[in-house]
Image (tube, helix red, strand yellow):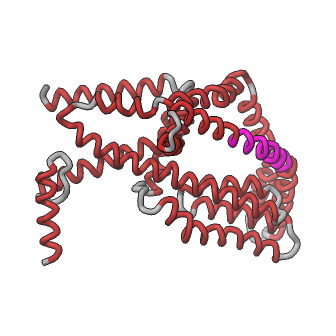
Amino acid sequence: MTPQRQLIYWLAGLGAILFAFWLLSNVLAPFLIGMAVAYFLDPLCDRLERLGLSRTLATSLVTAFFVIAVALVLALLVPMIVGELASLGKQVPGWIDLLRTRLVELSDMLRTEVDPAILERVRSYVEGLQGQLSSWAAGLLRNVLSGGVALFNVLSLLLITPIVAFYLLRDWDALVSAADRMLPPAYADVIRLQVQKVDETLSGFVRGVGTVCLTLGAFYATALTIAGLDFGLVIGLLAGLVSFVPFVGATLGFIASVGMALLQFDGYIMVFVVAAIFFIGQFVEGNFLQPILVGDRVNLHPVWIIFALLAGGTLLGFVGVLLAVPAAAVIGVAVRFFVNRYRATVLGVGDDPGDPATAARLRATVAGKETT
């Protein structure tokens, strides 16, 4: 088969896979989450196997522990989060009234300096802002909770995901071996090397960055709640979960929590305490969590991750968000591979994984140039 025909087959297969994802996007979420859970827990099962347990027993223990841990976390957090969101919904109209009053006062102060017609339009807009936001929030809540589709999706996530995770985790090594046997012999070594790089990137992100985000979310939520900040639990959890993009989660959490502290507390001592919580979190993340849990294993630029998440969400919705990071890792590794091949074959420098002898010779040549 000629290289051109092979390229056509590969592109046709990729197009068929993307079309299938688009066609089945409404039912893929439990399976993708189950696959992510299995990928996350596979090293723990491997460790239990090395201790003498069978794969089925190790999978059963790990899956049961994971399900119990998630259930306990949800049982503790969901009522608290729902309560804080309900309280937030009750306080938002009061904040809007306060904002409207302050803007009206500001317009009265500027009446002598600004065209009265412009001020009247601003006043009418601000006065109608509360009704618009209230109707928007009610419509959003109605769309989220209405119908049986949302309930079906939630039940499918809760019931199907653990089952998918268990079977994938039990048969993970067999599935990997079956996929390895399907590789074309002429390119098997090259593909294995690139898949290994993708695995290193994904494991660093999913296991390393994911653990960092969960740790920071727990720290921020606990510290803000102890400090007595209203909605500190929600703000802390969101700040931690968004921390996969450096400084973004901490910055958003800092602005939201300090703004809330200014509204809630009379003095500035508690405002400084709330601000210090995020400074401590950033110090711990930069000096301990990131070096220990992540290191230099993640070769994904934060901007590339943000773009992948937005693009995936736009194309496939929630399923696209789930696929965004793996797709970004695969594309990043593929781009670096082809750049290295180009540099090795055209420019005469670089690393050509398809030809180990040439790669070794080029590395030795480059090393000699650097030392002279």
Q: Quadrant of residue 280?
A: bottom right
Is residue 83 magenta-colored? yes
From this viewpoint, is residue 237 visible?
yes
Q: Residue at x 22, y 31 (%)?
A: 184
Please report the bounds of the magenta region as a residue range.
Answer: 69-88
Residue 86 percent across, percent down from the top left: 84, 45
From this viewpoint, is residue 313 visible?
no
Decide if residue 157 is on the left or right side of residue 224.
left
Q: Is residue 282 depicted above or below 7 in this figure?
A: below
Front one among 17 and 114: 17
Front one among 284 and 307: 284
Specify the farthest residue to the front. Answer: 52
Front one among 122 and 111: 122
Q: Is residue 169 depicted above or below 199 in this figure?
A: above
Q: Residue at x 82, y 70 (%)?
A: 109
Residue 359 percent across, percent down from the top left: 15, 55
Q: Residue at x 76, y 75 (%)?
A: 272
Front one among 348 and 191: 191
Residue 189 percent across, percent down from the top left: 23, 41
Q: Is residue 147 depicted above or below 211 in this figure?
A: above
The kind of secondary structure the magenta stretch mainly shows is helix
Q: How many marks?
A: 0
Decide if residue 190 is on the left or right side of residue 142.
left
